[in-house]
Each structure stands twice: as structure tokens, then as C-alpha cells.
């Protein structure tokens, strides 16, 4: 049942994400995408919360020290047993901080979205390596992680 709901959500997200106008200022893109995702999820019966608080352990890349931080998941949604957490970074790379917030969140479907770059397969590979690296340090019991690259109109599934 959850898998059917996930596939339905992926269809809705694809329609919203891959029709977004990308040639705008980062802050405009961020607001527009999250507003459009919120609207689409509400229409499909989800309860939606923008900027959901999330405590998470953040590992500094330089010295590997770990600090507990208070952050926010860009968009959280719930319908029945399916819970969704979405982080959007309007750059080419998904930040480690965004990945860690999602992994440590209570959501069953974790989605990281980047504007990306449709010219660089290397950038896409680096994003996937970054996600795999972060995922390898955690247990993804009953979680699905999706990586969406808006420029490449691609969705990669982990877990």
C-alpha cells in the first residue's frame, strides 16, 4: 500500500518539479517550487507543513566533529501512513546538511531536490556519491530516499 502511495507521489512531484521555470533568481525558484509542491500535495489529500522543525546531528566535513543542530525541513507532508520530508537546494549540489536532516527525520519518504545542471553528468554523479556516502553511515529502515535534479528532469531512488 505504501509503495503505491509513493509511486503516486512521485508522479505528482514529477509533474510539479519538471514544469518549474528554472531561469529565475534562486529565492524566487525556492519559493515557487515549494508553493507549487504544497498546492499539489494539498490537492492530493496531504496535510502539509512548510519549514518543519528538525533536530539533527551535523558532522563537519573538515574535522568530523558532530554537533546537534536545530534546523528545518523545507516541506513536510502526511497522508495516512505515508510521511514525506522535502529539502530543496537551489544549486547544483545537495548539501550534506540537507541530506543529514532528511536521513535523521521521522519521514518515510525523504526527497532531496536540486536545480542542478543539465550539462554535467559529473555533477549528477557527485550528488549521487554524496548521498550514498551519507546513507552508508546511517540505517534507512523503512525509508525511501529520492534525489531529484530539476535541470536533468531525473529522479534517482535510494533505499
Image (cartoon, rainbow, N blue to C red):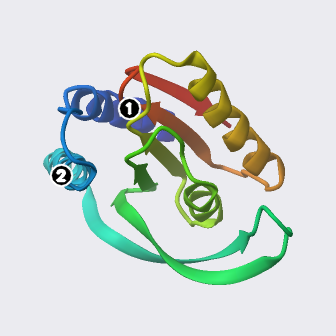
Disc 2 designates what residue?
A: 28
Position of residue 112 in the picture relative to residue 12 (left or right): right
Disc 1 packing (10 Å; few <14; some 14–19; many ≥20): some
Position of residue 20 in the picture relative to residue 106 (left or right): left
Q: Is residue 73 above or below residue 5?
A: below
Residue at 50% over, 76% down? 71
Disc 1 designates what residue?
A: 10
**What percent of the width, then of the height, locates residue 65?**
83, 75
Separation of marks 1 and 2 at Cα, in angstroms:
23 Å
Residue at 52% over, 59% down? 107
Whether residues under marks 1 and 2 lie with C-beta atoms below 8 angstroms apart, the answer is: no
Place residue 67 in its image quadrant: bottom right
Residue at 20% over, 33% down? 23
Q: Earlier in the sequence, mark 1 or mark 2?
A: 1
Q: Is residue 86 above or below residue 68?
A: above
Disc 2 packing (10 Å; few <14; some 14–19; many ≥20): few
Place residue 154 in its image quadrant: top left
Amino acid at each position: 500500500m505504501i509503495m503505491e502511495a509513493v509511486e503516486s507521489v512521485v508522479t505528482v512531484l514529477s509533474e510539479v518539479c519538471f514544469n518549474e521555470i528554472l531561469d529565475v533568481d534562486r529565492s524566487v525558484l525556492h519559493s515557487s517550487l515549494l508553493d507549487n509542491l504544497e498546492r499539489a500535495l494539498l490537492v492530493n489529500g496531504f496535510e502539509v507543513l512548510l519549514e518543519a522543525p528538525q533536530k539533527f546531528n551535523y558532522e563537519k566535513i573538515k574535522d568530523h566533529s558532530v554537533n546537534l543542530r536545530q534546523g528545518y525541513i523545507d516541506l513536510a507532508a502526511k497522508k495516512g501512513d505515508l510521511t514525506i520530508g522535502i529539502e530543496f537546494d537551489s544549486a547544483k549540489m545537495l548539501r550534506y546538511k540537507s541530506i543529514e536532516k532528511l536521513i535523521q527525520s521521522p519521514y518515510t519518504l525523504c526527497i532531496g531536490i536540486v536545480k542542478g545542471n543539465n550539462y554535467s553528468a559529473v555533477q549528477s554523479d557527485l550528488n549521487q556519491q554524496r548521498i550514498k556516502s551519507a546513507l552508508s553511515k546511517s540505517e534507512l529502515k523503512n525509508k525511501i530516499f529520492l534525489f531529484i535534479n530539476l535541470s536533468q528532469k531525473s529522479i534517482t531512488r535510494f533505499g
